[in-house]
Image (cartoon, helix red, strand yellow):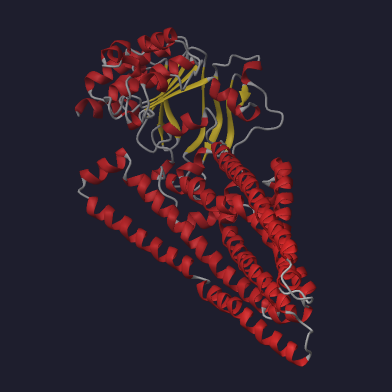
Amino acid sequence: MGRPMGGGRGMRAIDESAQRKLNAEAPRVADLGGRIVALFRPYRRRVAVTALLVIIGAALGAIPPLVIQRVFDDALFPASGGVQLGLLGWLVGLMIALYVLAAATQIVQTWLTSSVGNRVAGDLRVRLFDHLQKMELAFFTRTKTGVIQSRLQNDVGGVSGVLTSTVTSILGNAVTVIASIVAMVLIDWRLTIISLVMTPILVVVQRRVGQARARIANETQRSLSELTAITQETLSVSGIMLSKSFNRQPAESARYASENANQIRLQVRQTMSGQGFFAVVSVLMSSVPAIIYLAAGILVDGAPGSITAGAIVAFTTVQARLSMPLVSLMRVALEIQTSQALFARIFEYLDLTPAISDREDAVDLASVSGPSGRIEFRDVTFRYPDASADSDPTLDSVSFAAEPGTHIAFVGPSGAGKTTILYLTPRMYEASAGSVMIGGRDVRELTAESIIDHVGIVSQETYLFHATVRENLRYAKPDATDDELERACRGANIHDRVMSFEHGYDTVVGERGYRLSGGEKQRIAIARVLLKDPPVLLLDEATSALDTVSERIVQEALEQAARGRTTITIAHRLSTVVGADVIHVLDGGRIVERGTHDDLIRAGGFYATLAREQESR
């Protein structure tokens, strides 16, 4: 749609200072834990069932060690002497039944966990996508597409594992740890104290390791965002054409390799951070049974008969069962600290407030009594959001009116503010001062949806999806019939050309329509607008990139499309606006002349100078 930003600001990538500004403007993420918990609210019943199963499974896992003690002390080595086979068989059967029941519980719990976690991650991804759809156009002109894609894919993907397993892991391991400690105390409280004496120190160390991992995770995601952005920019059709045109493929590969090397370095750092801590934990946990044997020997030696062999075996069995959930809890704690950086990045985007949104009392344009095809600018002044306060405005006190069914045009040098007028009309940007009126009402008093429904836009940068001609046309009207598609295409002078394709309307146009010529793409874009059938038509230099023959064909289609509609044309080639009812000449953000083509030529002013320059080329 032409130049999206005044003064050469269009579509440039967001730099570090702009990113810092964006971060500063976004509200601070408060009560991150509470916001994460809130994500599970729609699935609270499933979460409750899952929690119950986790508790049951953990409790079932804590019982076998107590049964083992009975096996040793009462069945295998009873005080009365002789193996008690009946009791032994019953106890072994009980142990096997407990294992089977625990396994079945685990299967159901895993299904519920995966179902809830993935649904929450999916909800978060859709919520973020929907929120980004509501952001103003300026947000997308200052932010790399790859960065946005990374937030949707990499950041949400990075937290999906936490969402699918963390809650049940914490609950299950916590219950297991508590149940195991209770069982250990029941067996021998003295051995319990000895086995747990180092735990508080490990918890403190774990917190510090988690903080370091969180910082590395944030760096890793930023690098991944940059890697995604490079991929999106350079491997698109436009990016490939650009790199080949300037023989920059080696430089692009080097840029990708450099960021990829940085990503590898950060991934290795993230993987290795905390490994030393867990190695120490592993050694300590593995050494505890040996220490228990020593302590038990001292207790037995000091007070014969105070602790049995069955108690020692049961205690070390419980302690071994305690080790895994205790280490898992520490790992989960690290993952939570790491994921906080990712959640913060996601909520940072969700907390962005669209600069342009409907008022609470906004009305539908269809309900306005005035003619919906009337466009008026009243002393409109506009600066782009990233422009400095002391810079000249892109538009300066611009006023004009377009009556229903009339055709007005804007011409002038690059940077004069022509395209900005087209962005302000459907309220893709907000006027800094003055009023933009549609149907006699200020656009700020109307709903954005109703404004867009009344406006059709054809730009010089036609965007077509990698889909069929039929699917691209139906983007404007999903329920359009084949007859409606054909009428729209005939009105755009493209039906016969489409039917000449091997698959007709089912022809795939390729990414951004690169399998079609420029004129064919433009005419399909015009047909798409005709299918929408809006009362207002905005044309942004729709033929400036075409050759003379294609321009003539497309111009005929545009003239037919403009019949009966209020049409505003932004033109570089004056030949395309000769028949306009009124031509406005812009220079430096101001309207310096206005009139018909013949009137402006006779006046011998700026327009006449532009006409002579184009004729001499």
- Name which quarter of the figure residue 597 lies in: top left
Query: Image quadrant for the N terminus?
Result: top left
In front here: 214 or 397?
A: 214
Q: Is residue 384 visible?
A: no
In front here: 130 or 206?
A: 206
The number of numbered discs placed on residues in the rendered structure image is 0
Query: Image quadrant for the C terminus?
Result: top left
In front here: 59 or 484?
A: 59
In front here: 375 or 603?
A: 375
Residue 142 location (% of width, % of height): 46, 46
Q: Residue at x 28, y 57 (%)?
A: 254
Residue 391 location (% of width, % of height): 48, 48
Q: Is residue 209 visible?
A: yes
Q: Residue at x 39, y 53 (%)?
A: 227
Tell me if residue 616 comes above or below residue 117 in the rendering. Answer: above
Residue 250 location (% of width, % of height): 23, 54
Tell me if residue 97 comes above or below residue 328 in the rendering. Answer: above
Residue 361 location (% of width, % of height): 71, 28
Residue found farthest to the bottom: 302
Question: Is 500 on the left-hand or right-hand side of 303?
Answer: left
Residue found farthest to the front: 82
